[in-house]
Image: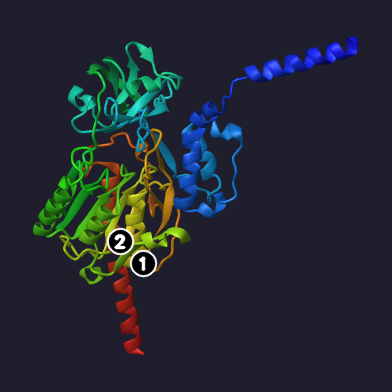
Amino acid sequence: MKTFIHTLLCSCLCVALFSCAEDRTYEYEEKTQHNHWMLDVMRDKYLWAEALADYEPSWKDFFSQPSDFMSALAKKGDNDKWSYVEVDTIEADSHQRGYYSHLDSYGFDSVLINDPTGMTTRSVARVLTVYPDSPAERAGLRRGDFICSFDGYKLSTKNISKLTKGEERKLELRTLAIEPIEGSLVWTDTVTLTLPQSEKVEDVAFPAHVVVGVEGVKVGYLMCTRLVEGNAEADSADKSYRNALDQIMSSMKNSQVEELVLDLRLCNYGDFSMVQRLGSSIVPRSLLGQTMLQTQWNEKNKASNIIVPYDASAVNLSLDRILVLTSAHTCGAAEWLIQALRHDMGEENVITIGAATPGQNVMTAPLSTMYHVTPYPSVAFVCLSDGTHDYGSILPDEPVDELSFLDLGQYGSVDEPLFRAAIERIFYVEEEVEDGDADDAEGDDADDAE
């Protein structure tokens, strides 16, 4: 009898417990719905969608942050490091360069280095770029400046992020010079500078352009930081950057520019329309109308493939050679442009100077937005005119480390290290060609004599 009663009580207790249990399935669905949706759209649009066809993430994966979930999906791609996610409740700059953020910053980029004099173990920040109409520019900060402290604090890897954005800051700048007798580096005068509070800072698409005469040759210089037609936030139909490019090229054509130095070291994003426009302004006239680039989507979306020709309506300089300045920030659309020019003009006629590029041979595109999440996966290969897309990092024909120079100069100045290297390369190549022609002539005379 006791056994029966005990069993009955246990049964009743279990029924009571289960009847009081709350169904929490909806919580799982609510907290993971964005990642479930992302997986579905990636299985359709992702360049390597077939790799996701049978992929079933664990329930823990679905609870991860959107960026982490995208990284897990991208690992199924072929070494895909370009796909990313934007969450409209989180401010993040998808195209940030170094310390510089468009969304909120002081408007300068720098690199932390050891004391170049070797006299201390302290670190200093060397300013590489000061963006137009930024708090840093208004404060008087200039490219090449050395920041030795801020608000009385020494610089280190732990606090350098405080020079990206925030409240007003007091900077201590020092000047580096060469000691005249021993030739060693020494610090000279010290000045203080006040950085205003950080704010949103827009890129200027073409912050520097100039035409200079060197030994009777007209050399054009154009810096491009973004290959987009206009400010999309202002107006989806804005063509102000495209119009600015056309005006610059018209001016260079009227100046009868014979050589062009294209500075893409700060250009890390853009779209096909401006890649097409800029490339069409450069190439020999005979290439106009021919294929420049084409896309290769996955099999399911091959109807989205496009062919991008050189645009005959662009202002055309019809150059036989171009020199391009590159860096680790030269990415995406800038790389597609360089690769197309190298393929169609000949690698020997597209001379790269600076540092190696990351090697992006795919395009990313925003998919629809749901649950405050917008995925930007790799959706297509960017192919050259012959259909190949197996290109990678662009290695410079002439490596130049601008940080090794005492004076960085200003962008567009012939004293700026990379621009100066490009000018020297122009005349170095010309001298080589002339010497080669002379050797050929001597050989022909010898043949005639025989």
Residue linked to disc 2: 429
Residue 37 vertical position relative to residue 433 in the rendered view, above or below = above
Query: Hey, what amino acid is under mark 2?
Result: Val
Q: Quadrant of residue 439?
A: bottom left
Give left or right: position of 193 versus 268.
Answer: left
Q: Does the rendering let one see residue 259?
A: yes
Q: Secondary structure at mark 1?
A: loop
Say whether disc 2 or disc 1 marks the residue closer to the N-terminus: 1
Q: Quadrant of residue 143?
A: top left
How far from the left and from the top, in percent, is residue 51?
56, 52
Colour mapping: rainbow
How far from the left and from the top, in percent, is residue 100?
32, 31
Residue linked to disc 1: 385
Q: Quadrant of the N terminus?
A: top right
Q: Circle 2: is it few (<14), some (14-19), or many (20+) Cα within 10 Å?
A: few
Residue at the spot x=33%, y=88% of the render? 449
Residue at the spot x=32%, y=83% of the render? 444
Residue at the spot x=60%, y=50% of the render? 54
Q: Quadrant of the C terminus?
A: bottom left
Give left or right: position of 155 versus 40.
Answer: left
How far from the left and from the top, in percent, is residue 59?
60, 34
How far from the left and from the top, in percent, is residue 207?
20, 41
Q: Which mark is residue 164?
A: none
Residue 404 vertical position relative to residue 78 in the rendered view, above or below = above
Give left or right: position of 155 versus 253.
Answer: right
Give left or right: position of 56 versus 274.
Answer: right
Q: Circle 1: is it few (<14), some (14-19), or many (20+) Cα within 10 Å?
A: some
Q: Secondary structure at mark 2?
A: helix
Residue 305 vertical position relative to residue 119 in the rendered view, above or below = below
Residue 280 vertical position relative to residue 197 in the rendered view, above or below = below
Q: Residue furthest toward the left?
A: 254
Q: Does the rendering let one see residue 394?
A: no
